[in-house]
Amino acid sequence: MKKILVCGAGGFIGGHLVKRLKADGHWVRGVDLKQHEFSELPADEFVIGDLREQSVCREVLDRPFDEIYQLAADMGGAGYIFTGEQDADVMHNSATINLNVVHQAQKVGVHKIFYSSSACMYPEYNQLDPDNPKCAEDSAYPAAPDSEYGWEKLFSERLYLSYARNYGMQIRIGRFHNIFGEEGTWQGGREKSPAALCRKVAEAPDGGAIEVWGDGLQTRSFLYIDECLEAVRRLMDSNFAEPINIGSEEMVTINRLAETVMEVAGKSLSLKHIEGPLGVRGRNSDNNLIREKLGWEPTMPLIDGIRKTYQWISAQVERQHSQSADRSYGTA
Ligand code: NAD
Ligand code: GDC
């Protein structure tokens, strides 16, 4: 049984990770700005706190945990990170969290930290062709991410790697490629495309239309949450100390993603392409390194993960509609 701290435990990946670590028999303290929105977490302790505050970091990082998983970040999908409107907050908030956490971890003698980086740190110039994006780990430099969110991830990767070099800490860095699943943000402006399209399809009347940002020919790959957690656990148990992609190689256009959701929902809808924040033109995980170093790669087809996610999001949509119907009935 290990003693583990999960930072960002009230979020999507952090919440699932707490459940997984508890199922594996570990003692877990979670910390986040907020309680988890969708689940009561089985964490042994859950601290509500702001990791931008050094005093909070000292409070939650008061002992030499066996492992830390640092997932806390000011983050969201294309609608949050590619408009430019949140740039200062994203950079300041996430960098401060990482500076505080790694500093305090080193002070109390934590040796092993997982840091959640993002595919957004890869250079834009390798992601202009939607059919042939290049995201091999060694293509990161010369650096040219297309968002401040990506630059912050790159900075923090280097921060953690410098603590490994100078203080002998064991750092594991996963570069996540669009992780999706149940209990992730599905409305409000921070949701990513799988959740956004599930919500739009669930809300649309059969035969209607849903809005898609851009021409829908931009490409991405999407990794289901359980596979993400499996990769993270394997990386933590390995000796591999360089950044590594954690993603799927099943690349699809956003139009194809929308069609997959409609197929799962059994709805026939048309796509209305509108202007919106787009990000890179193409992106796909390159899994050569993870196959070589961890002897593992994800196997779940996109449609299977979308089936689970759609079921959960359509239930959220239904619940919200019946709550607002109850409210308007109450005021009538
Ligand atoms: P999320 O937004 O659901 O979770 C992040 C959590 O961090 C939130 O619960 C938030 O409240 C918390 N947080 C933010 N600021 C904080 C602060 N100052 N103090 C304490 N907690 C704070 O996002 P997620 O999808 O679970 O992502 C987890 C991590 O993985 C993030 O670092 C994100 O950048 C990274 N990542 C995620 C994806 C993805 O597709 N989900 C892809 C690439 C990288
Ligand atoms: O939001 P996202 O899934 O993030 O968007 C993928 C593509 O889908 C974008 O080109 C976006 O314009 C398009 N899209 C079309 N319609 C919609 O309704 C919609 N909502 C959303 N959200 N997108 C729509 C993500 C980051 C994450 C993370 C990962 C790492 O970028 O948002 O924070 O770091 O990358 O892979 P995406 O894939 O661009």
Image: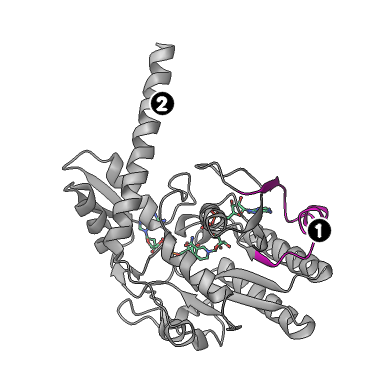
Front disc: 1 or 2 = 1
The residue shown at (55%, 41%) is: 40
- x, y percent for residue 264: 23, 52
**Label 2 element class:** helix
Q: Say if disc 2 is inside 8 Å of ligand 1.
A: no
| Type of amino acid at the residue the image marks with label 2 | Gln
- x, y percent for residue 156: 66, 72
Residue beneath disc 1: 62
Colour convention: one colour
- Which numbered disc flags the more N-terminal residue, 1 or 2? 1
Q: Look at the image and give the residue range highlighted in magenta.
A: 43-68
The residue shown at (47%, 78%) is: 124
Q: Is residue 320 above or below residue 295?
A: above
| Type of amino acid at the residue the image marks with label 1 | Asp
Residue beneath disc 2: 323
The residue shown at (38%, 57%) is: 193
Is 285 or 13 nearer to us in this picture? Answer: 13
Instruction: Give the left or right position of residue 327, taking residue 239 as reference.
Output: left
Toward which corner of the image does residue 280 lie, by quadrant? Answer: bottom left
